[in-house]
Amino acid sequence: MSVRANKPFGSLIYELLRKHVETSKNKVAFINVENKTQILYKEIVEKSGSVISLLTDMKSLECIDRVAICSENNLNYFIPVLGCLYLGCPIVNISHTYAKIELLNAINTTKPSVVFCSRAMFAVISSVCLDNNLEFVKKIIVLEDIDYSDANNTKPDVVELDNHDVVAAMMFSSGTTGLAKAVMLKHENISYFYNQFQDEKLLLSHVLNTLVIVPFSHAYGFIMTLVLLATGKTVKFMTKFNEDIFLQSVEEYQIDSLTLVPPLMVWIAKSPKVDEYDLSFVKHIVSGGGPLAENVIEAITKRLPNITIGQVYGMTEVTLAATCTPLDYIPAKAFSVGKALPGVKIAIRSTSLVAETFLGPNEIGEVLMSGPIVTKGYYKNTEETENTFFNNGYVASGDLGYVDNDGYLYIVDRVKDLIKYNAFQVPPAELEGLLLTHGDVIDAAVVGLKDDTHGELPFAFVVKKANSELTASDLQEFIQKLVSYPKYLRGGVQFVDSIPKTPVGKILRRELRDLINRVIV
């Protein structure tokens, strides 16, 4: 069933969910592949309607209020999410991986009337609210303990919103440059992606039999799951990534498409475990959350020759993605992050000029994006909104990139992550990609080490294979043979057990810079 969205997403998904139930009363909505528990579409519809009754009975909820949810991936996660979408009430998604100070920032920024959480998060959420006297939180509700005894008799009153511009959800940006900011996603943003995932000309439409491993609280997991539900697919998910369970599930459920983040792409390329399982059903792998190194794409293509590898590029501020690898892409373009999605515009501006000044093809500058993907800005943060969301409709990405003559976008690095050695700019991602080509390197991250003479020196943190005899000088010599003089790892190499990253695989360079102060004597 293919239905184009022409109404607010809350109304649309309610109609679609009911149709899925009418088609099959035993249709499975979610499966937790770790413990094989599941929930039916029929239960989702009934329980999400019951949540509306629960919220409206409190008499403390109006459309301008907010409801928050903080949980690991959970069978019940989307029940309050759907209820809030029906009601026209913004649902605030808060990462369960947050430390207390981050939870306090998220709750205090958005001031939800109600917080839904899993049993695992109840103690810490309660502590944050009580210890900081957050009286605006009227109730904390444990997802697993909700009484659904009247669910069969509940028919929700779905609010017919006047326009698509109403805020549907709030997602927090990665917070790698400070405390996370609440991005306001509109109903029309979600409806746009529902439409794109049904466009057979796009790679997105071919990734609907997948395994969701990204947190539901992240835009990638949130939007993907809503689209899967709207299209009547069974959402197969993991609460926490485990190599063996992941590979077993791909084999058992005959997954034909994978949506991964770059660190997992590196793992697919290098792990010997991959050869132990049957991945013959997989036809497409789509990577998002950061550009892929060329050697990673080449290694996966060699290992799994019958698989199409694509990339999407975007950020929370543009809902999910602005570009995607086209189905008919030219092999020579495999290392790009694709072309602009329908209705989306990509522009490149010089980092030394005003936002309205755009560069031409193959010129490197900051990537800007516009179109129906652009969200409403940061909640209660006018200054940061004005710095990122421009009056001309474009959103600043903070990424350096260029568009070639055929419209393919290439990402070079983060503007703020560039290492300044003398007058030269050194992209960390380039050095990281080269380090990963070394047979003894499992993972790597590069940051700038402050230096009074040269400004910054490239410094690498490296995870090496167990029992490897690789030394820092070995890697410095290895890189020296591959790059120009300014890019030498003259700051040094430090071996570590792991590289700190966000739940979706973005390197936490701020933590690495702090670590430098502890390892450099």
Image (spheres, rainbow, N blue to C red):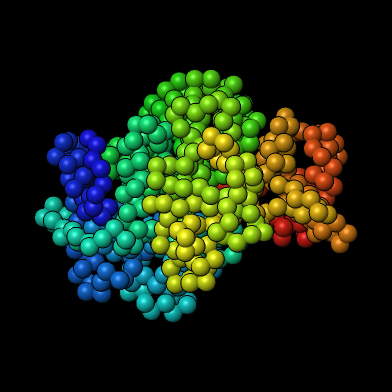
Q: Is residue 377 visible?
A: yes
Q: Is residue 30 visible?
A: no
Foreground: 391 or 157?
Answer: 391
Could you tell me how many numbered marks the image carries? Answer: 0
**Quadrant of the drawing holding the C terminus:** bottom right
Farthest residue toward the left? Answer: 153
* Quadrant assignment, res 17: top left
Q: Position of residue 455 (x, y in %)?
A: 82, 58
User: Which residue sits at x=68%, y=38%?
Assistant: 433
* Quadrant assignment, res 352: bottom right
User: Which residue sits at x=60%, y=61%?
Assistant: 354
* Quadrant assignment, res 90: bottom left
Left or right of 77 on screen, residue 327: right
User: Which residue sits at x=85%, y=42%?
Assistant: 485
Left or right of 111 on screen, residue 383: right
Q: Position of residue 259 (x, y in %)?
A: 46, 37
Q: Position of residue 129 (x, y in %)?
A: 43, 73
Position above or below: 373 against 139 = above
Foreground: 496 or 414?
Answer: 414
Left or right of 117 on screen, residue 98: right
User: Which residue sits at x=88%, y=59%?
Assistant: 453
**Quadrant of the drawing holding the N terminus:** top left
Foreground: 48 or 245?
Answer: 48
Q: Position of residue 515 (x, y in %)?
A: 73, 57
